[in-house]
Image (cartoon, rainbow, N blue to C red):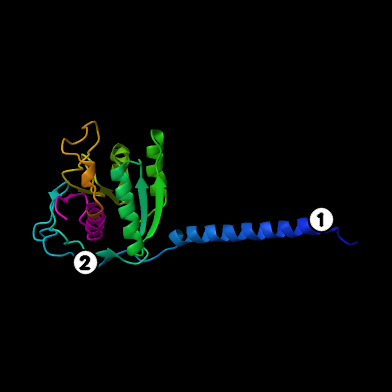
Amino acid sequence: MSRSPFRAARAAAALVAVTAAAALTAAGCGAGDDWSKPRARPSAVGTLGAGFVDRAHPPGPEATVTPAPGSWEGVGPSKGYRVVLLTAGTDRPTTALVKAVRDWAAESDVALRTVTADDGPGLLAAVTEAMDMHPDLIVSAGNDLIDPLATVTPNHLAQQFLVVGAELAEPTANVTAVDWSGASFRGEGLGMSSTYDPASFTPERCAASVRAGVAAVLNDLTGIVLWLDEV
């Protein structure tokens, strides 16, 4: 029995829809598989320049060090470095930091995913979501995330975190921060620094903070604060 033109058109449309859905599912699985497959441990490509830290006297836990300007420029991650950008807020400093992370990831052949946190309870949930992806590094941008990170990070020492434009009051060895005089928010009820200046979050300083922080993490110089008044 022959099909009516209407029934035939409907069947063709259904086939197209099923094919498109299958393609989307396959694409989604592929993206997930990229992060689930085993691979070699990521490493630093290049070496730190003179003056990044004193290798003869490496910084202790929670130390603040002032690397020489540009001493981090020769270091990057190996291909496929997995990074989650964890961000909260739409203020100018946060927006500038987010752009710096994304620009760096694009230039460095980094596998980047983004988790954007909501206010209140959503902040802790966002940190958990980022950790559940099991990235090589979680980069935090936004002052609202400092207190949630202070709560979560001591219980997940195997996960490396990089905080840019702020710092934790009592960081554990898995939390590295990059800060400067115009930033230095520390959370835990300590309030905003008297020197806080949104204008200090320039594209140049934000870019330097990301690169310097990643260079420190890749060289196992973690649990410290890098102070970048000069870039």
Residue 48's tag is: none
Residue type, numbered disc 2: Gly
The foreground one among 43 and 28 is 28
- At x 29%, y 37%, the residue is 147
| Left or right of 12, for residue 53 | left
- Furthest toward the front, the residue is 199
- Furthest toward the bottom, the residue is 46
User: Quadrant of the image for the C terminus?
Assistant: bottom left
- Crowding near the residue tagged with mark 2, few <14, some 14–19, many ≥20 C-alpha atoms within 10 Å: some
- Crowding near the residue tagged with mark 1, few <14, some 14–19, many ≥20 C-alpha atoms within 10 Å: few
Q: Is residue 171 magenta?
A: no
Residue type, numbered disc 1: Phe
Q: Which residue is mark 1?
A: 6
The x, y position of residue 68, in whole percent, is 12, 58
Range drawn in magenta: 205-231
Q: Nearer the viewer, mark 2 or mark 1?
A: 1
Q: Is residue 227 magenta?
A: yes
- At x 24%, y 50%, the residue is 202
27 above or below 147?
A: below
Q: Using the rendered image of the protein, determine whether residue 137 is visible from the camera's viewpoint.
A: no
The x, y position of residue 212, in whole percent, is 22, 57
Q: Secondary structure at mark 1?
A: helix
The foreground one among 48 and 211 is 211
- At x 33%, y 46%, the residue is 95
Q: Secondary structure at mark 2?
A: loop
The foreground one among 34 and 193 is 193
The x, y position of residue 187, in whole percent, is 25, 36
Q: Which residue is mark 2?
A: 74
Q: Quadrant of residue 23?
A: bottom right
User: What distance separates the C-alpha of mark 2 from that of mark 1?
Assistant: 65 Å
Q: Using the rendered image of the protein, determine whether residue 146 is visible from the camera's viewpoint.
A: yes
